[in-house]
Image (tube, rainbow, N blue to C red):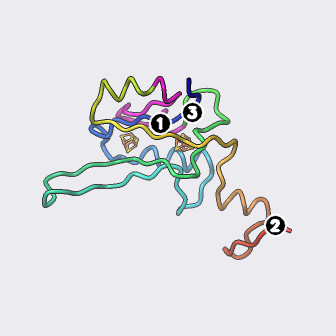
Amino acid sequence: MSEVRGLWIDVEFCTGCKACEMACRQEHSLAPDEYGIKVVEQILNGGFTYNFVPIPTDICNLCAHRDDEPACVHHCMASVMRHGKLADLADALEERPGSVLWAVREKEKPRTKRADVYAGNIVDGNESPKE
Ligand code: SF4
Ligand code: SF4
């Protein structure tokens, strides 16, 4: 059975509060224009339908350093996020047809601009390969 892990989000009940974005930014010391998860606003039917869809980015590493749940899941005030193995989370898709499941690539650390700054890879905001 697959060991791939991911994030399940019940977008039908996501309030668009963006607490997940903020929690991720704080947890990983991301720059203001970096996102481990981004809440996309979907406006349809002349503005009568307004959906929020949080989407993990390639920075997301499922908070591999944390022993407990990922920061975004912990801080989701609407409790519409879960994490774990895709096989386990698939059941939630059946329970909540309006939900989504994101598979996340396994990696130990997220690649961020600040991480590069600490490693000396960015000079004056321009990326330069480390010697
Ligand atoms: S699991 Fe961790 S790294 Fe991924 S979006 Fe949530 S807080 Fe960010
Ligand atoms: S913290 Fe939860 S309710 Fe708020 S935008 Fe993120 S997923 Fe939606």
**Mark 1 or mark 3: which is in front?**
3
Q: Is mark 2 within 8 Å of ligand 1?
A: no
**Mark 3 or mark 2: which is in front?**
3
Magenta stretch, residue numbers: 71-88
Q: Which image quadrant for residue 4? A: top right
Question: In 3D space, how far apart are the residues under numbered discs 2 and 1 (Cα atoms)?
Answer: 33 Å
In the rendered image, the vertical position of residue 15 relative to residue 44, given as above or below: above
The amino acid beneath tag 2 is Lys
Q: Secondary structure at mark 3?
A: loop
- Residue 23 screen position, x and y as percent: 51, 44
The amino acid beneath tag 3 is Val
Q: Residues within 10 Å of mark 2 (few under 14, many from 20)?
A: few
Which residue lies under the disc numbered 2? 130
Identified at 79% across, 65% down, the residue is 120
Q: Secondary structure at mark 2?
A: loop
Q: Secondary structure at mark 1?
A: strand
Q: Quadrant of the N terminus?
A: top right
Identified at 38% across, 35% down, the residue is 77
Q: Which mark is residue 73?
A: none
Of the numbered discs 2 and 1, the one sitting upstream in the chain is 1
Check whether the beta carbons of the residues at disc 1 and disc 3 lie within 8 A of each other: no
In the rendered image, the vertical position of residue 98 relative to residue 46, given as above or below: above
Q: Is mark 1 within 8 Å of ligand 1?
A: yes
Which residue lies under the disc numbered 1? 7
Q: Which image quadrant for residue 128? A: bottom right
The amino acid beneath tag 1 is Leu
- Residue 73: within the magenta? yes
Identified at 55% across, 33% down, the residue is 5
Which residue lies under the disc numbered 3? 4
- Residue 39 screen position, x and y as percent: 39, 51
- Residue 22: within the magenta? no
- Residue 19 screen position, x and y as percent: 43, 44
